[in-house]
Image (cartoon, rainbow, N blue to C red):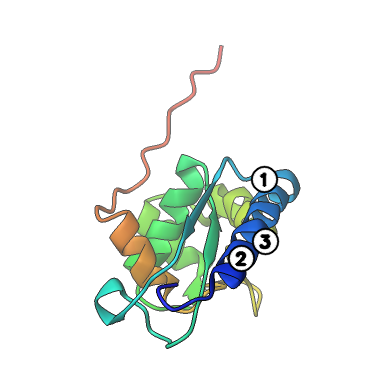
Amino acid sequence: MIDLPLATLGAAALESRLLSRALVEEFDATGVNIFQNNGIDANQHVPHYHLYVVPRLTALQQKYLRAMAQLGPGPYKTGDIAATLGVRAAAIATIRQQLIDKGMVWSQRHGETAFTVPMFDVFTKRQIPVFERHKPKRRILK
């Protein structure tokens, strides 16, 4: 970004706006974060311009991703994610599918989940430094 020509930077900003709108409309994102890293100390791992447009997630979706990150680089077995969260595997199936639909995770094999972006486990740990197991609300049937 520091060395990017102004015309290119302006075009990237316009594209990020279009992409942000698409994420909100098509993937039911609750909002978006847009960021860009410059330099080694800013966690830039490749020597060219990258603009990240990350859809915001619900609290449960964030917990799911943080549980994945807790387990390391992945891929992850659904049962291991559930155990990390302290719930049954069936209880997280809907959250997993929502994250797949949003493009945050993918499944190469049945019962496995992985981040779609390399090193997203590290990013997730920086963004959500404290891991908390899920505490489901108990429903009282009448």
Horizontal relation, residue 118 to residue 44: left or right? right
Between residue 137 and residue 117, name the one nearer to us: 117
Looking at the picture, which amino acid does disc 2 mark? Ala
Q: Earlier in the sequence, mark 1 or mark 2?
A: 2
| Residue 41 placement: quadrant | bottom left
Instruction: Relative to 36, say whether 61 is above or below.
Output: above
SS for dot 1:
helix
Q: Position of residue 27 (x, y in %)?
A: 70, 50
Q: Of callouts 3 and 1, which one flags the residue occurring earlier in the amino acid sequence?
A: 3
**x and y percentages locating residue 44 in the rendered image:** 36, 79
Name the residue carrying label 3.
Answer: 15
Question: Does any portion of residue 86 appear in the rendered image?
Answer: yes
Q: Nearer the viewer, residue 8 or 27?
A: 8
Residue 83 visible to an observer of this rendering: no
Which residue is tagged 1? Answer: 24
Q: Quadrant of the N terminus?
A: bottom left
Tell me which amino acid carries mark 1.
Answer: Val
Q: Do residues under tags 3 and 2 come within 8 Å of each other at their CB atoms?
A: yes
Label 2: few (<14), some (14–19) or many (≥20) C-alpha neighbours in 10 Å: some
How much space separates mark 3 and mark 1, taking CA atoms?
A: 14 Å
Measure the alpha-carbon separation of dots 1 and 2: 18 Å
Q: Which of pointers 1 and 2 indicates the residue nearer the eye?
A: 2
Pointer 1 with pointer 2, Cβ within 8 A? no
The x, y position of residue 5, in whole percent, is 53, 75
Which residue lies under the disc numbered 2? 12
